[in-house]
Image (cartoon, rainbow, N blue to C red):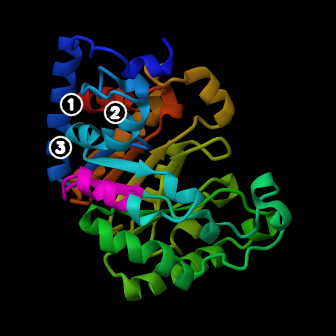
Amino acid sequence: MLQQDLFAGEPAALPTQERRSNLALGARLWALAEDHIYFGTSSWKYPAWKNSIYFDDYQTKVAFDKNCLTEYAKTFPAVGGDFSFYQWPHSSMLREIATQCPTKFRIVLKCTDLITMAHFPRIPRWKDLAGLQNPNFLNVDLFVEHFAGPCSAILGERLGPVLLEFTAFRDEIVTLGPELGHRISQFVKAVNLRFPEIQFAVEFRNRALAVPALFECLEPAVPAMTSWTRMIAIEEQWTRLLKLKRNWPFLMARPVLRPGKLKADADAQYSPFGRLHERITPMRATLIDMWQFARAHNIPSYFMISNTIEGCAHRTIAEIVESS
């Protein structure tokens, strides 16, 4: 079926079993959110989720993209926002999110990459800047003006922890280790002087940075447990974090890719992300362990699941929640 066919003609009859399952999942997830346990997907605009998450009649893809977050939020109490990684979040987009979601909903936005990359990647997007040092790496004033200020003003309490994603570092940055952690910590503390309500999670995507010596330098930011191509397994990250015995203000896990798997391969294998293709038992067990730990210690926690980890994020979440 062509994608545009999903939005054309008369709406299909509702698949009763899928609808019942969806309502039950939503009730369970929102009940968990009352205890500050937030499960959500890393994004939300997937036409293949029609008749499993989305049941409303969207006449066009444009209408779907613009309005489906309202329906998404009936099932999920949280969502990830990658759109803010590649450009500053526009006020119009933030207002659309705020008007479509209840105040108890949480959106975990990625910090714009202009703040988190030490050097401009050698890709066409950066043209003449490719390979050069980024003068705005961890620039507090720039972040406050273009990110923290608008997001805090428009989203209010809907704004969950902001994710600082550090993807590709040169060797000289990786070898900084704890010094890099201290720089990130200083950035967060400086932002919190102006916006004390904003929390930060830090996601490293370099195996060499998944070390306790760096984790413990990040406070008041929290290390996010991530499953990614070039990272150690998420269960090993969680084991290392537990050994620090810190009183973290919240926990976060973001399973994105199985270690060793390229995103392009996952996209090709799993698209359009309507069904599960595999079940990664150690990853699921780690999320359940983090969830139980958070509940036992009364710590808010965020579990943001990507389609590219097993094939369909909402089905991964449903099976994890049902198994616990």
Side of 260 relative to 233 (left or right): right
Identify the mark at residue 271; answer none if there is no mark. none
Question: Which amino acid type corresponds to the residue marked 1 in the rendered image?
Answer: Leu
Question: From where the camera sits, is residue 240 visible?
Answer: no
Name the spot of residue 296 as percent of width and height, x first: 21, 53
Write down the quadrant of residue 58 in the picture.
Answer: top left
Question: Element under label 1?
Answer: helix
Identify the mark at residue 25; answer none if there is no mark. 1
Question: Element under label 2?
Answer: helix
Residue density around tag 1, few if under 14, some if 14–19, many if 20 or more, within 10 Å: many
Name the spot of residue 73 as percent of width and height, x first: 25, 43
Proximity of marks 1 and 2: CB atoms separated by less than 8 Å: yes
Q: CA distance from mark 2 to mark 3?
A: 13 Å
Q: CA distance from mark 3 to mark 1?
A: 9 Å
Residue drawn at x 68%, y 45% as measured from the top left? 230
Question: Which amino acid type corresponds to the residue marked 3 in the rendered image?
Answer: Trp
Name the spot of residue 190 as percent of width and height, x first: 47, 86
Question: Which amino acid type corresponds to the residue marked 2 in the rendered image?
Answer: Ile
What's drawn in magenta, residue-wise?
Answer: 93-108
Which residue does the numbered mark 3 point to in the structure image? 30
| Earlier residue among tags 3 and 1 | 1
| Earlier residue among tags 2 and 3 | 3
Residue drawn at x 55%, y 23% as measured from the top left? 270
Q: Is residue 98 magenta?
A: yes
Residue drawn at x 40%, y 57% as measured from the top left? 93
Which residue does the numbered mark 2 point to in the structure image? 317
The C terminus, quarter of image = top left
| Earlier residue among tags 1 and 2 | 1
